[in-house]
Image (tube, grey):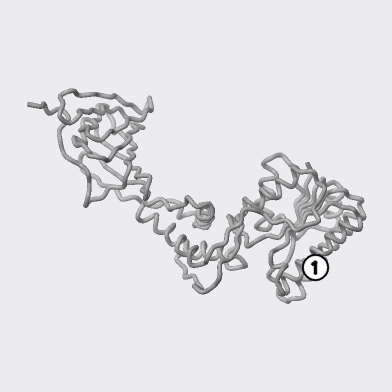
Amino acid sequence: MKILVTGAKGFIGKNLCLTLHNVGHEVFEYDLGSTDEDLKAYVSQADWIIHLAGINRPLKPEEFIDGNVNFTKKLLDVVLATASKAPVIFSSSTQAALDNPYGQSKKKAEEELFAFQKTNNHPVYVFRLYNAFGKWCRPNYNSVIATFCYNVAHDLPIQINEAAPAIDFVYIDDIVASFMNVLSGDGRGSKDIVYPEPHYSEKLGDIANALYGFKKSRENFFVPAIQDPFFKKLYSTYLSYLEEDNFAYPLLSHKDQRGSFTEMLKTDNLGQVSVNVSKPGITKGNHYHMSKNEKYLVVAGTCEIKFRKVGTNKVITYKCSGDDLKVVDIPPGYTHSITNVGTSDSVTIMWANEPFDPNHPDTVMMPVEEEIK
């Protein structure tokens, strides 16, 4: 389909246009710098119109009317003049329910659209958006999450009013998905206000704590707790505010003449992932665990992983290579070792079901090759 997007260069517009392009739609991008002739040409060709353009941070309050109401009227006049049948999706705001200049300008724009729908039997969808957040949202402008993410990522202070009530938020991908759902529908319009879902009611103090936790995770190597959908989306958003020269961060590597052992990721309830590098001929391990269990994956070089059940003589050997990837489970109660039997350094990814606790290591030294007397 051919889709006109006004405000295409804005936060929502950039994300929406990218998705529309990705699924094969032809997108007419209207924004600052576009002409009246562009608008007329785009409207006359469009199968759908998604109206995102507007003003939210003017120099003077009266600019709200010009940017939000008058431009909407102008767009609808062009729709009428070109006899366009394209349904119109309008991006309004929950501020439209409030008595402030921005909200009232959005409310008046909504009224213009609903009146146009009634008078001309033209399909219209009016979306009231909650506070939007996600990648590419401008910080220190009109999004508290964008500002918090940017400031935390750049070691700048943030201001939190602990007494402030929870705020309703909606994630950019959910906004885009809501619009895409309408595009795949019957195009008959709606006489009711539509809200993108899901949305989340969160307190700024909780958001700030989560963001500082995300930042700290690069130092303690604990994967942020992102089981909650909102905080999963918040983490994705936070990462988008890192400087391009700050994507990488160092790990703590324990090195000796045998090679190295580096903890990569830790979790509160899903264990930890480490990277073990061994020089040729080096054997590591020769211990067992009472409850701890592990998984080994040799990704480079060739290793022999040996086991012996505690209290028995039988030695079990698995030969593993980076050329034939397979995971070897390390059960509790089996003393085990890993030996680099190749001619180059071996690299093994190791998962343990719990982060290492030096106060309770659950590790008992015992050679695998020792015979039971």
Left or right: 68 in relation to 169: right
Dot 1 amino acid type: Lys
The residue lying at 15 percent from left, 35 percent from top is 366
Left or right: 132 in relation to 154: right
Return the x and y of residue 193 as percentages of the image width and height.
75, 58
Which residue position holds label 1?
108
Q: Is residue 289 above or below residue 370?
A: below
The residue lying at 69 percent from left, 68 percent from top is 95
Q: Is residue 19 above or below residue 65?
A: above
Left or right: 111 in relation to 8: right
Return the x and y of residue 286 as percentages of the image width and height.
18, 35
Instruction: Answer yes or no: is residue 356 visible.
Output: yes
Q: Which residue lies furthest to the left in this view?
A: 373
User: In the structure shown, which secondary structural element does the residue marked by tag 1 occupy?
Assistant: helix
The residue lying at 77 percent from left, 49 percent from top is 28
Q: Which of these two is toward me, 29 or 336? A: 336
Instruction: Answer yes or no: is residue 30 visible.
Output: no
